Amino acid sequence: MGRPGLSLKSAGRLVGCVVVASLAATAASAADLPVPAPVAPAYYPPVYDWTGIYVGGHFGGGWMNDLVTYPTLTAPTPIVPAGAQTRLSPMGVLGGAQVGANIEFAPVVVGVEGTWTASNITGSDITPGLIVAGNGSSEKATSNAIFEATAAVRIGYAANDLLFYVKGGGAWMRVDYTQQVFSGPGSSFNTLQTITDTRAGFVVGGGFEYGMNENLSLKVEYDYLGFGTKNYTFNNLAFGTLVGLNVVGTPLGPQSVSVKSQLQMVTAGVNYRFTWR
């Protein structure tokens, strides 16, 4: 008798066992493979928002350019020739505060700003005078800028956290103008008068601002303040003449003076912005 062959049923069982064993081996190998790390999401840098109300301070330097003109011989005894001019160009330090608000329509930033700046910019110059009653004479003009204030509109372009801007608006300057007359023998006799005024004009300027974080920013700015020409009359001046051995003061009468004034400032500052969200 020969060996009995495998039945069809037995062959099917054998194939099933082989398939099950193969799947079990594949699963065991897959379990030993390292688990892939999760894919990090794409990075998008934050967009800086300039919108908000801010307050801050600034410090820097400024220089004045005043042209003082004696246009007419209004005084009974004039000290300087008609049309005489002297130019004052003093420099000094200044500092103050600012407050403003911005709205960003990316990349355009529109805002308003008010500033107040104290200064110590003072300058003088002497104009040689006419001969008064046989004595030498001269007149000294002094300008002293006490503080400046501005109210302006700002328009800028934001390159994310860097803002470039220009500004323009109104400007005011509190200033002392002093005229001092020297006369008498050796110009030993002198009188002076100071007129304090608040000049009104305009401001134009520009600068850039860098956002350090959501609230703090640093800025550098240049401003030009123009105040035009204004006339002043000094009524309390006198000149001295030698009478015997004494120098006697005689009222000079109205002394007309015009002052064309402008001021330039370069400042660095810091702002703290209150965000609206």
Image (cartoon, rainbow, N blue to C red):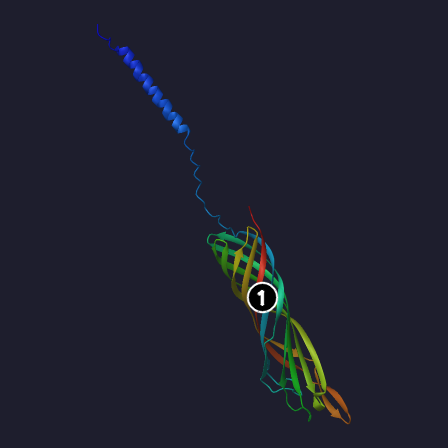
Q: Is residue 242 left or right of residue 92?
A: right
Instruction: Say if 51 sits above or below 148 in the image.
Output: above
Q: Residue at x 37, y 22 (%)?
A: 24
Asked if residue 75 can be seen in this view, the reply is no
The residue tagged 1 is 171
Quadrant showing the N terminus: top left
Instruction: Say if 163 sits above or below 62 in the image.
Output: above
Q: Residue at x 39, y 29 (%)?
A: 30
Query: Around disc 1, counting alpha carbons within 10 Å, would you say few (fewer than 14), some (14 to 19), or many (20 or more)?
Result: many
Asked if residue 181 can be seen in this view, the reply is yes
Q: Amino acid at mark 1?
A: Ala
* Image coordinates for residue 178, horizontal then vertical, percent: 67, 77
Instruction: Say if 169 sits above or below 16 in the image.
Output: below
Query: Along the line of sight, which residue is nearer the eye, 22 or 232?
Result: 22
Q: Residue at x 32, y 19 (%)?
A: 18
Query: Along the line of sight, which residue is nearer the eye, 175 or 24?
Result: 24
* Residue that protrudes farthest toward the right in the picture: 245
* Residue that protrudes farthest toward the front in the picture: 1
Instruction: Say if 237 sits above or below 117 in the image.
Output: below
* Image coordinates for residue 94, horizontal then vertical, percent: 62, 67
Q: Is residue 120 left or right of residue 168?
A: right
* Image coordinates for residue 59, horizontal then vertical, percent: 61, 64
